[in-house]
DNA sequence: TGTCTATGTAAAGCTTACTTTACTTTATGG
DNA sequence: CCATAAAGTAAAGTAAGCTTTACATAGACA
């Protein structure tokens, strides 16, 4: 899956750590999702979408 | 997470096995998602949404 | 009755998501 | 130069998603 998380986070001026704190996951999980090493779980994808006030489909695209 | 998969599948007249075949997962996975034993992965949630021609948010809701 | 289909669930095993710890690199500011 | 913050990654462990096999139950139908 492709995603625009890094851009969304950058637009907010947040570090991976700060985003991890908001999402209640580790900064390594944020990094892994941004760098495409793995996809978030569905509950985490929902949390991300809500945080950035958009839909899951806005952020994540099937490759 | 709550979901309306069972209703959507019923509307199509499909068995859990038939849906599993379309999604390329086992019928037990379909059953587990419908009965709320676990959530699908994000890629599988995308497949489900596309199959029923709607968004992930249409089908899955945070509890 | 017996059989077939659909559903629910459990156990064991594998893969993927996620955590903690830790090391490295790059950039920035003193 | 040194210190700090941010980012990337790796290893080891836990948790969750998914598979296969298997057994049980309920309904439809000959």
Image (cartoon, coloured by chain):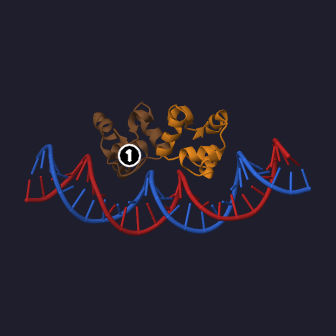
Chain colours: A orange, B brown, C red, D blue
Residue B42 % position (x, y): 49, 43
Q: Quadrant of residue A12?
A: top right
Place of residue D25 in the rendered image (x, y in percent of width and height, measured from the top left): 18, 57
Residue displayed at 40% across by 38% down: B60
Q: In which quadrant of the rendered view does residue D28 lie?
A: top left
Quadrant of the frame with the C terminus of chain B:
top left
In the rendered structure, the residue with mark 1 lies on which chain? B
Residue named by callout 1: B20
Vertical relation: A12 (above or below) D18: above
Residue A30 place in picture, x, y as percent: 61, 47
Residue visible at 33% across and 38% down in the picture: B4
Asked if residue B19 shows in the view, the reply is: yes
Element assignment for label 1: helix
Judge whether residue A35 can be spotted in this image: no
- Apparent side of residue A18 relative to residue D24 in the rendered image (left or right): right
Residue visible at 62% across and 34% down in the picture: A8
Please give the name of the residue rendered at 64% of the width and 47% of the height, measured from the top-left corner: A17
Q: Nearer the viewer, residue D11 or C16?
A: D11
């Amino acid at each position: 899956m492709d995603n625009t998380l890094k851009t969304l986070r950058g637009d907010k001026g947040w570090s991976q750590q700060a985003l991890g704190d908001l999402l209640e996951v580790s900064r390594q999980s944020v990094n892994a999702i941004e760098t495409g090493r793995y996809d978030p779980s569905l509950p985490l994808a929902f949390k991300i979408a809500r945080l950035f006030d958009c839909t899951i489909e806005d952020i994540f695209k099937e490759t």
